[in-house]
Amino acid sequence: MKFTILTLFPEIVKAYFEASVMKKAVAAGIIEYELVNIRDYAHDRHHKCDDEVFGGGAGMLMKPEPLDRALEAAGSPAQRTVYVTPSGRLFNQKMAEEFASGGNLIIVCGRYEGIDQRIIDTRITDEVSIGDYVLSSGEVAAMVLVDAVYRLKPGVISGESLEEESFASGLLEYPQYTRPAVYDTMRVPDVLTSGNHAQIARWRLKASVAKTLAYRPELLSKDNLPGEVDSLLREVIDEGGWHEPGTSDPGRTDQK
């Protein structure tokens, strides 16, 4: 899969592709990337890429000419072209899976007040928001999107790890612990060191249900919840719901 990132500041994005798991994915040939500096397609002597907004108002807007040329060279709109913007569709795990199962992606990083609407109308296939807040850097939003997508490609991360992550099953992920079993008087729940895999699986699912109820209850507002999830949800509610780790919550009922 190839990511083509169009940006005014490629140096912000470059380091991301050259470190950690992404670096390994690139070296293995699973992921390709190209960073396109939009200024290279501005033909005036100052490589100007922004101008005032028609109708007045604060801030500047990215000009259509250089961006249009850059997108044409990148292969848009024949290739799926994403513009990361606060006014787009809200990004989620389902959308990440959709992008990962498709072909290459072109991603446009906005700056200032955004980009000219005529580019959106003619070149952009998807307007995507990573959350209900505003950033000064489209590059940061683009990296969030890329990170959520590329890790789903086969060979990047083990399938087992992906299956147990938050949102993979529609629930938030359960709390996790590592050695030592006791740290500063805080003990790992006994069930996790019992070796009883059936009990461990039930504990994890119940803790996922409890945490989802507390932090993202809308994920549980479905009429067709699996029977075991629905049963555990009722159990969690009867026990008073989720409490922060370290207190008496469904995830740590056997704390000593």
Image (tube, helix red, strand yellow):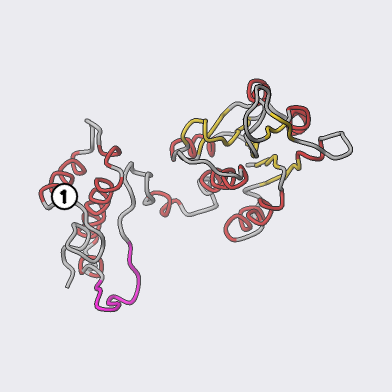
Give the main secondary structure of the magenta stretch: loop
- What residue appears at the point 71 percent right and 52 percent down from the top-left corner? 11
Q: Is residue 75 magenta?
A: no
- What residue appears at the point 17 percent right and 73 percent down from the top-left corner? 256
Q: Quadrant of the N terminus?
A: top right
Badge 1 crowding class, 10 Å Cα cut-off, few under 14, some 14 to 19, many 20 or more, is: many
The magenta span reads 176-187
**Percent coordinates x, y for residue 131 in the rendering:** 46, 40
Q: Which residue is mark 1?
A: 236
**Percent coordinates x, y for residue 78 in the rendering:** 68, 25
Disc 1, SS: helix
- What residue appears at the point 74 percent right and 28 percent down from the top-left corner? 68
Residue 254 appears in which quarter of the rendering? bottom left
- What residue appears at the point 19 percent right and 43 percent down from the top-left corner? 228
**Percent coordinates x, y for residue 175 in the rendering:** 31, 59
Q: Is residue 177 magenta?
A: yes
**Percent coordinates x, y for residue 13 in the rendering:** 66, 50
Residue 8 appears in which quarter of the rendering? top right
Q: Amino acid at mark 1?
A: Val
Q: Is residue 142 above or below residue 119?
A: below
Which residue of the protein is positioned furthest toward the left in this rendering? 238
Q: Is residue 220 above or below residue 247?
A: above
Front position in the image: 128 or 177: 128
Which residue of the protein is positioned furthest toward the right in this rendering? 45
In the rendered view, does 205 fall on the left or right side of 85?
Answer: left
